[in-house]
Amino acid sequence: MDVSASPAAGRDEQAVGQFVESLARLMAEWGFPRMSARVLLTLMSSDEDGLTAADLADRLNVSPPAISGAVRYLVQVGLIERRPVPGSRRDLYRIRDNAWYTSSATVGGVYQALADLSAEGVRALGGSDSPAGARIAEMHDFFNFVQEEIAGILNRWQQTNTSPERSPSRSASTTQNS
Amino acid sequence: MDVSASPAAGRDEQAVGQFVESLARLMAEWGFPRMSARVLLTLMSSDEDGLTAADLADRLNVSPPAISGAVRYLVQVGLIERRPVPGSRRDLYRIRDNAWYTSSATVGGVYQALADLSAEGVRALGGSDSPAGARIAEMHDFFNFVQEEIAGILNRWQQTNTSPERSPSRSASTTQNS
DNA sequence: CACGCTATTCACATGCATGTGAAGTTGATG
DNA sequence: CATCAACTTCACATGCATGTGAATAGCGTG
């Protein structure tokens, strides 16, 4: 095996690539756009403080248009930001600091939508008197509960990590090994 | 327009159908199989204590094979159960009582997988010393945190709603007749 | 013992999302 | 002012998931 570009404890490019692909695959499996996931993870695992569309296309071996669509989505949902480089035509794409926090807040919104819709369901069923009505009412309670709890989780995370901005590396040890 | 089958405060079949479709669409948008979502919600919004594949095919205006595939998935992930009817060839499909609980437990498992994979990412990056390593390490911490918190949420839900097992979900007064 | 109903499996068609190549647009530079 | 580089938009091809129809297997019934 050739560890050509791997100083003692430095990056293992091959392993990093594998990591990006594995995680992107997992995210894609539950509905996240594949290409956007790859772009996001490539940005996260780069030491530079931003990459251009050309850089991304090169590292991922895809065409620039694919990058274009992927970053448009990522910017729209607030996971990355584009920073036009003053002297140049290039734009740098950069991860927003609270990316995962934002992402999970979106998940919370989904639960809110689920709760709202199930409330309509209870109405459609004529109240919670019937078995079906009771079932949907319970579903509504559950989603409502989860939604509130998720908000609590995010608050706790914010407090634990004081400013969600640029928190220093605090986790040294990797929890578990296979 | 004729509201032929709408007793005063009873089921509004049209609204129920709309509810099923809306919620199924939302679930499909974040990765849940469309047909399985429709079947699940149809079961939930039925007052009978179980429906046959033929019933489901009829109510959803789809072919029996589509039902077959949908219920196989639902049974596999533990959201519904099949109850062979003793005297007949028919099988009744029925929602498991803790369906949403089970479903959310699965979501928790996803976060666990995310945490595990990001731990590998930190290793691939040679530790959390580099900017990228620090970023992935923070991601790992976040997923780990969320995963633990989700477990806490579910426990709290269990306690609030006493036993999640086989709890007669007729929390309200359901005049159940078999 | 044969028939019929119910559910499943197989091969196929349809629809949708996604990535590619070519052309277009915009801003920097000599 | 002309040229070049970088990103974006458009039209198309490919792959994948999903639902349908025909044929099959199993169990209750006359």
Image (spheres, coloured by chain):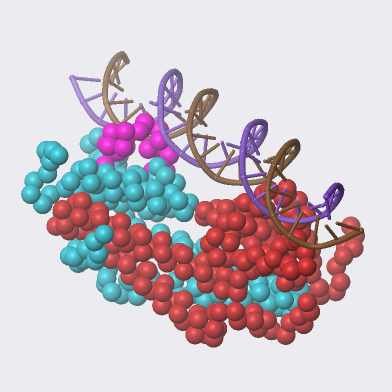
Chain colours: A cyan, B red, C purple, D brown
**A30 or A1: which is nearer to us?**
A1
Q: Look at the image and say whether residue B146 sits in the magenta stretch.
A: no
The part of the chain drawn in magenta is A49-72
Q: Please state the horizontal and vertical placement of residue A24, each as a whole percent of the image.
A: 37, 48
Quarter of image, res D29: bottom right
Q: Look at the image and say whether residue A62 sits in the magenta stretch.
A: yes
Main secondary structure along the magenta-highlighted residues: helix
For the image, the number of numbered tags is 0
Q: In this image, A22 relative to D9: left or right?
A: left
Q: Is residue B136 visible?
A: no
Q: Please state the horizontal and vertical placement of residue B30, each as a whole percent of the image.
A: 52, 55
Q: In this image, A158 relative to A171: left or right?
A: right
Q: Residue at x 33, y 70 (%)?
A: B145
If the image is split into quadrants, where does the C terminus of chain B sit? bottom right
Quarter of image, res D11: top right
Q: Residue at x 28, y 33 (%)?
A: A58
**A82 or A119: which is nearer to us?**
A119
Q: Please state the horizontal and vertical placement of residue B155, each as a whole percent of the image.
A: 45, 80
If the image is split into quadrants, where does the N terminus of chain B sit? bottom right
